[in-house]
Image (cartoon, rainbow, N blue to C red):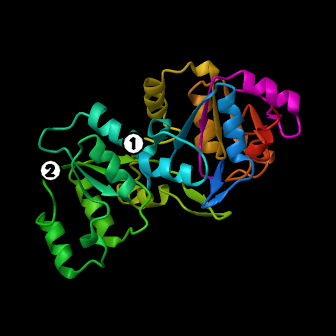
């Protein structure tokens, strides 16, 4: 772990030397490339520059609300060419974990989803059955009859073996009650990610961690297995797919406790913190254990040729 972080903004020689050290750049999106629907100045040109130098670009996001195809569409709408296979999101990571790694009884393979369509799409891509999620029948207030049917088990699907929590824009008491009951009955507790906040429109809003937090409290502190950054299960899955050399790979992000920690714990060759998202100044990592190898005020500061 570096004891000091190198500032690359306004340092053309430092930028060139830094870029030359890597073949692969893993990019967080929200807070690095854009905030909400606002694309940061210089983002497109910086990515074009890296690709022109033969660098591989992979978009690694904890945003579970979008599938890989959704992210490809958003990238292209922002003027950033991308392939579905260049996107690796927490929803896809969770789907891979459930379908290929997690060992579930044959009659308990259904996933109860707290989240949006991005999770459902990726579960479908892996052939994983699921309920909850965007089901409109759950977007309502709980009723006295619901209490009775949930307590008796009548309202439950006996094949549910996993509760998967991601960012859910329509979370409510009924969904939490169902998720809690499935967990109390032995379902595996997973989360796409546990980010406490989500940067958008230049401000911070509740992140996916705010959805799983009530369940953690209800379960006496039991935490879910998180499958987004900084989970090394996600790093292993990315490495397995893209077959890169970790020493020649750099993680670029705005959040110290997810992006930068992800790169450091994954023993990547470098980490780059961009100060356009959650992290706003270098003082935030001074005296801590999570120190990026380098930092820039904005991603566009890498455009030096």
> Does 120 sit above or below residue 231?
below
- Which residue: 15% across, 57% down? 157
- Callout 1 crowding tier (Cα within 10 Å): few <14, some 14–19, many ≥20: many
Looking at the figure, which quarter contains the C terminus? top right
Q: Report the Cα–Cα distance between label 2 and label 1.
A: 22 Å
Q: Answer above or below: position of 220 versus 190.
A: below
Magenta stretch holds residue 46: no
Quadrant including the N terminus:
top right
The residue shown at (30%, 31%) is 101
Q: Tell me if label 2 and label 1 are in contact, CB under 8 Å.
A: no
Please name the residue shown 36% across and 51% down the image.
Answer: 119
Label 2 crowd bin: few (<14), some (14–19), many (20+), radius 10 Å: some
Q: Give the range drawn in magenta.
A: 1-30
- Between 220 and 80, the one nearer to me in the picture: 80
Residue 234, image x and y in percent? Answer: 46, 34
**Helix, strand or loop at disc 2?**
loop
Q: Position of residue 143 (x, y in %)?
A: 23, 80
Residue that mark 2 sits on: 159
Front position in the image: 219 or 163: 163
Q: Does residue 141 lie above or below 257 as drawn?
A: below
Which element is circle 1 on? Answer: helix
- Residue 153: x %, y % from top left: 13, 63
Sequence-first disc among 2 and 1 = 1
Q: Which of label 2 and label 1 is nearer to you? A: 1
Quarter of the image holding residue 270?
top right
18 drawn magenta: yes
Say which residue label 1 marks.
92
């Amino acid at each position: 772990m570096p004891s000091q972080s190198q500032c690359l903004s306004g340092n053309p020689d430092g930028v060139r030397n830094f870029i030359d050290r890597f073949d692969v750049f893993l990019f967080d999106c929200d807070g690095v490339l854009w905030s909400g629907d606002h694309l940061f100045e210089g983002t497109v040109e910086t990515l074009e520059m890296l690709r022109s130098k033969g660098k591989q670009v992979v978009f690694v996001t904890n945003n579970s609300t979008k599938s890989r195809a959704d992210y490809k569409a958003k990238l292209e709408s922002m003027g950033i060419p991308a392939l579905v296979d260049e996107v690796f999101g927490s929803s896809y990571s969770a789907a891979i974990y459930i379908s290929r790694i997690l060992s579930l009884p044959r009659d308990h393979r259904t996933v109860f989803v707290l989240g949006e369509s991005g999770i459902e799409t990726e579960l479908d891509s892996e052939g994983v059955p699921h309920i909850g999620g965007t089901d409109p029948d759950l977007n309502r207030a709980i009723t006295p009859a619901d209490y009775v049917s949930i307590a008796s088990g009548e309202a439950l699907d006996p094949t549910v073996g996993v509760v998967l929590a991601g960012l859910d824009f329509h979370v409510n008491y009924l969904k939490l009650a169902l998720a809690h009951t499935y967990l109390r009955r032995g379902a595996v507790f997973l989360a796409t990610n546990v980010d406490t906040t989500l940067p958008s429109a230049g401000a911070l809003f509740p992140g996916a961690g705010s959805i799983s937090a009530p369940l953690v409290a209800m379960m006496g502190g039991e935490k879910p297995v998180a499958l987004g950054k900084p989970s090394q299960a996600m790093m292993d899955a990315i490495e397995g797919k893209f077959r890169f050399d970790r020493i020649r790979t750099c993680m670029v992000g705005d959040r110290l406790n997810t992006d930068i920690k992800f790169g450091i714990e994954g023993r990547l060759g470098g980490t780059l913190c961009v100060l356009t998202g959650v992290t706003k100044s270098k003082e935030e990592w001074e005296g801590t254990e999570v120190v990026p190898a380098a930092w820039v005020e904005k991603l566009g500061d890498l455009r030096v040729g």
